[in-house]
Amino acid sequence: LIVYDDTADMVAVARMFAVDGLLLRRLTKEDAAPMQTGIRASREHLVRFMPFASADPDHLEFRRQWIGHVAERFDQGSPFNYGIVKNGLVVGGCSIDPKAHGAAAIGYWVHVDHTRRGYASAVARALRDAAVDAGFSPVLLRHDQANIASKVIAEGLGSASFDPSRELTPTRSLRVSDRGTARPRPVANVTRQ
């Protein structure tokens, strides 16, 4: 899924990969309407734990521009945002976000009508494996302390505690590729106060 290229000090990240019947793929502008619809439907569910759910404007043009921006950043090497697709339907979003000191943060959200189906666990596992394959360590899964479901997911991935005050900023240059394999590794669990 992600391969480290020692000669170029860059990481190659897949544009898409499959896990447990889900397709994680780079977002396109065609995803704007279903993603905005999903965020709108899930806003009450998400806003408790994810600031973007209340901060992002609730209109389609904003979502198109945001997708254009994250697609450019994907090509430039950071962060890597994916749509979570099930049977052709966008059911959420996720990302691998390179940070300082070789770390990466992973994140995800699932449409409220598609929760409790194991999607978030499968996506978190796939993102963790992809980030580890790229050579990132630690791999961080940040979640609100009150988000019990994400806490359980992190624990299921073999989480370890991590100091949330540690500064995490992008430091690596990355490039896109379709090569690589996955292997399980622990996730460092970062909770927000």
Image (tube, rainbow, N blue to C red):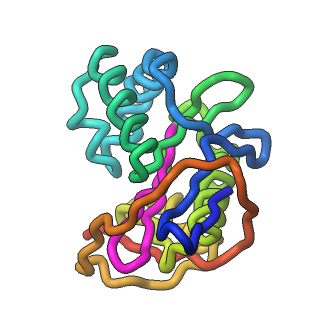
Classified by dominant secondary structure, the portion drawn in magenta counts as strand
Depicted 140 relative to depicted 20: above or below? below
Residue for point 71% across, 39% down: 22
Residue for point 50% across, 79% down: 137
Percent across and percent down for residue 141 are 46, 66
Percent across and percent down for residue 50 are 33, 48
Q: Is residue 95 magenta?
A: yes
Which of 82/76 is in front? 76
Left of 56 or right of it: where is 100?
right
Left of 100 or right of it: where is 129?
right
Which of 134/165 is in front? 134
Picture quadrant of residue 170: bottom left
Percent across and percent down for residue 76 are 39, 46
Quarter of the figure with the C terminus: bottom left
Depicted 46 relative to depicted 140: above or below? above
In the image, the segment drawn in magenta is 93-107
Name, please, the residue furthest toward the right: 21
Depicted 151 relative to depicted 112: above or below? below
Which of 183/47 is in front? 183
Quarter of the figure with the N terminus: bottom right
Which of 193/135 is in front? 135
Residue for point 64% across, 64% down: 3
Left of 188 or right of it: where is 170?
left
Depicted 9 relative to depicted 54: above or below? below
Percent across and percent down for residue 87 are 74, 25
Counting the numbered discs, the total is: 0
Q: Is residue 103 magenta?
A: yes
